[in-house]
Amino acid sequence: IINNLAILEIIVIDDHSTDDSWKIIEYYKNKHPEIIRSFKNKNKGACSARNYGYEQSKGKYIQFMDSDDMLSKDKLAIQLKELNSNPGAVANCGWVHFEEEPLSDDYIPQSIDKSYLDPINWLLDSWNGGGMGQTGCWLIPRELIEKAGLWNESLLKNQDGEFMARVLCQATSIVFSKNVFSYYRQPNIGNVSQQVSIDSVKSLLKSYKLYEHVLEYDSRLEVREALAKNFNAFIYVNWNTSRV
């Protein structure tokens, strides 16, 4: 941010696309070389692509987006303003599933869609069934990522949950931005998030085990009980995984 004007940088990572994505990226980069940079990160996975993009970035605030994400028009501007007024906070907003056209009228509020003075309480409410986050909702100060560490490239499932749990442990609060949204395209059956395999189930369990680092910051009984609920839910859903 220079002279109160936000300087935008867009970093696009192509993870072995097989359609015309790279040509489209190059077209827009040539039109806007001052803000768009593109790189190939061949077939290394989503977390690797996010980490590579982060390493190429210079911005004070980081917005991660996957290929199936869209943002409402004023999302970044509103969240930037709110974060500038709340040092150490992370910004969140509501999210909407869509198939053809993203519509804010389709937003279904979750109980976690609110501001939090203690970010770990957002984790508790989420783990206790209050809802789930989505990658595009968050606008994150760079300094929090530097403290929390990058995305875990060994995970196939719940990558964003594990990453944000670490980020939220470093944040002072969560500012919830109303009337702006992240739009999440309904995933195809082939997407990683929809795949059911022994490896993905093992990865999900690993992400739940990694959640336990939260106890280093807050070891309340409520935190332990919420962590246990994750494992209970895992057992309930995956007890017969051997049949996969």
Image: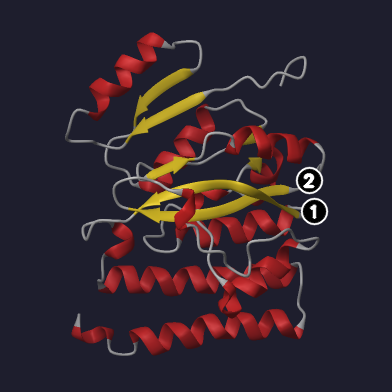
What's the amino acid at mark 1?
Thr
Q: Quarter of the image holding residue 164?
A: bottom right
Q: Is residue 26 above or below residue 231?
A: above
Query: Which element carries disc 1, helix, strand or loop?
Result: loop
What's the amino acid at mark 2?
Gly
Q: Quarter of the image holding residue 216?
A: bottom right
Q: Quarter of the image holding residue 80?
A: top right
Q: Is residue 220 visible?
A: yes
Looking at the image, residue 105 sits to the left or right of residue 173; the answer is left
| Residue 190 pos. (x, y %) | 21, 57
Q: Residue furthest front?
A: 105
Q: Is residue 101 above or below residue 119?
A: above
Residue position marked by numbered label 2 in the rendering? 88
Residue at the spot x=63%, y=62% of the render? Answer: 113
Q: Earlier in the sequence, mark 2 or mark 1?
A: 2
Looking at the image, residue 241 sits to the left or right of residue 28; the answer is left
Q: Is residue 182 above or below residue 5?
A: below
